[in-house]
Structure formats: C-alpha cells, structure tokens
Amino acid sequence: MLLKGQEVHPALLVIDVQNCFMSEGGSYDILGINISDYNRVLPNICSMVSLCRDKGIPIFYMMAVREPSGVDLLTKTHKFLPKPREERIESAPICVKGTWDADIIDSIKKSVDTSSPNVIIKRRDSAFFGTELDKKLCDLKVDTVIICGVDTSICVETSLRDAFNLGYDVVLVSDATASMDAKRYECTLEDVRNFFGLVLDSKSLLKEVGQQVPEKDYYHLYRK
C-alpha cells in the first residue's frame, strides 16, 4: 500500500475508545470531565475502522483496564504522581475489569469480537508497555501504525512515541483523536509533525487509501 508515495504495511491502533472516557454515565462523565470533544471525533474513528477493514489493514483495539483490587493503580507504584492525576484516580475506580465502564463503546463494539487477539488490554498509558502488541505487529510485518482514539496528549501520544522508538513509522489522525485540553491536543500534533511522523486528517487518509487495492489478506487472522 502506498502512503505519501512510500510503500507501507500499516495497522490501525484504536486507543481507549471505552465507556469510561466517552459515554454518558461513564467515569469521566461522572467526574465532571468534559467528554464532548471525545464524542465529536467518534464518527471519524468509526470511518477509520471501516476504511481499514475494507482495505484489509489489521486493526488493534487497545483497552485501558484496571483490576478490581486496585493492585495495578498508578498510585501503588509512583511516589511523585502529579496531584490532578492522583486525585482523579483516588476519586473513583475507572475502567475496572468486567464492568460496563471498561467496555468498548457500542458504536465500535458491535463490530468487534472482544475475545479476539486484536483486542489488547493495557495497564499503563502506552499500548506497547507490558502487552504483546509489538510482537503481533511484527508477526504481520507491519511497519507503519495509524493511530486514533483518546486521550491525544496521554495514551495516544505515549503509544505513538513508543511506536516510533520501536522503529515504526507513525501517522496520527488529527480529527480522530481528542484531548481534555485543547492546548495539550495542539502541542501533541505539533510535536508529532516536528519530531515523530505524519499528522493527517481522516479525509486525507480516506482519499489516499480509499482508492488502493486491499492489503494482502493477513487480516483474516484479526477479522474483528
């Protein structure tokens, strides 16, 4: 597949598109965090999923999940956790394993088998830390990751930086990601443009990838 005139073998990473962050009644909504920007980009996330499915591009869904016991909370391992994050963690359990809060949102979940190998649970911000994502991408000979989801300046950016340092080319879909803070969102986009890879909007990707022949059918391994 060609992207900007270069031969690439891409995969799509969908980061933390879960009820906790994006749904009314989810933890972020209950905590009073404005989730409107997260929801604003959801149609574009769905468009990216549909495009990649149609073109045989592997899709991996990352899910932030915490144990009911709280054993894996950041407050258990960090002495100098920033106060806003510490307060958010201690105010309410979020993304607890086995709860609706941790589930992928319905508009995405309806086309995903959550028991399939392309749904990957992560315990930290990065999609790569403590997961098998890198191995799965290598097995599929992926060299480029297209990234969408939330939050732009936290889990999305951390995953993107790790992907870059692992040797992947990175593409951030600017209108298929969102942050709690507009300034932090813009800072991430600027950093990606200057230091890490491509920033493209969904229309540009749809135009460039949409007319191409589907990828070799590795996708049967990761059908949903």
Image: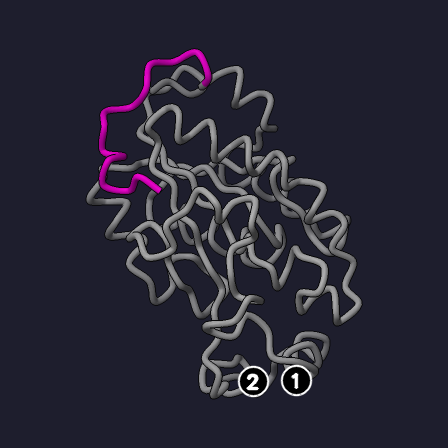
Residue at (57%, 38%) from the top-left corner?
Answer: 45
Q: Main secondary structure of the magenta part?
A: loop
Q: Is residue 97 above or below residue 210?
A: below
Q: Amino acid at mark 2?
A: Thr
Other-residue count near label 2 (Cα within 10 Å), few / some / many at <14 / 14–19 / ≥20: some
Position of the C terminus by quadrant: top left
Residue at (25%, 49%) from the top-left corner?
Answer: 136
Bounds of the magenta span? 210-224
Q: Which residue corresponds to mark 1?
A: 90
Q: Which residue corresponds to mark 2?
A: 75
- Identify the colour scheme used: one colour
Q: Is residue 127 above or below residue 37?
A: below
Q: Position of residue 36 (x, y in %)?
A: 76, 50
Residue at (40%, 63%) from the top-left corner?
Answer: 121
Q: Position of residue 166 (x, y in %)?
A: 34, 50
Whole-number angstrom distance, CA of label 2 to CA of label 1: 8 Å
Residue in the foreground of this view, choosing between 97 and 3: 97
Within the magenta stretch, is there residue 212? yes
**Toward which corner of the image does residue 215 lie, by quadrant?**
top left
- Residue 23 is tagged as none
Indicate which disc, 2 or 1, sits on the residue closer to the N terminus.
Answer: 2
